[in-house]
Amino acid sequence: VADPGLALVRRYIQSLIAGDETAAYAALGGTSSDRSLDLKEEAFLGKDARITSMRVSRVDTSGETIDADITSGSGSYVATYRVSNGPNGPTITQHDFIKV
């Protein structure tokens, strides 16, 4: 069975790589006019970026935490996403990354 949280995070990252901010904001549960949302991964996600692996690191009743290894022209990164189950389906409610 496909994991909807993993699929959402993959869509979010691929949207940023493709330059589709509208789809990226939708994965965060908002729109580009929502100033509380930040597409911080744009700092390193260019057309050359690739997801090298993804894994669910934690699951609980409210959602899951997903780690993604990403390689781009500016280096290798580990990004962590908190996906929460909401009334309209899963959304990314927290996201951070570190360069490794």
Image (tube, grey):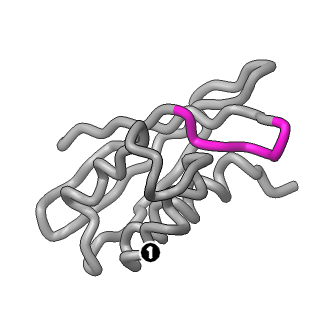
Q: Quadrant of residue 73?
A: bottom left
Q: Which residues are magenta?
A: 87-93
Q: Which residue sits at x=26%, y=48%?
A: 77
Q: Is residue 5 left or right of residue 51?
A: right
Amino acid, disc 1: Asp
Pinpoint residue 82: horizontal percent, then vertical percent.
55, 32
Q: Relative to the observer, which residue lies in front, 84 or 32?
A: 32
Neighbour tally class for label 1: few under 14, some 14-19, many 20 plus, Cα within 10 Å: few
Q: Residue furthest left?
A: 74
Q: Is residue 69 magenta?
A: no
Judge whether 78 appears above or below 86 on screen. Answer: below
Q: Quadrant of residue 99?
A: top left
Q: Is residue 13 left or right of residue 76?
A: right
Q: Residue furthest top?
A: 61
Judge whether 74 appears above or below 61 on screen. Answer: below
Q: Quadrant of residue 93?
A: top right
Q: Is residue 89 magenta?
A: yes
Q: Which residue sits at x=41%, y=62%?
A: 52
Q: Relative to the observer, which residue lies in front, 21 or 83?
A: 21
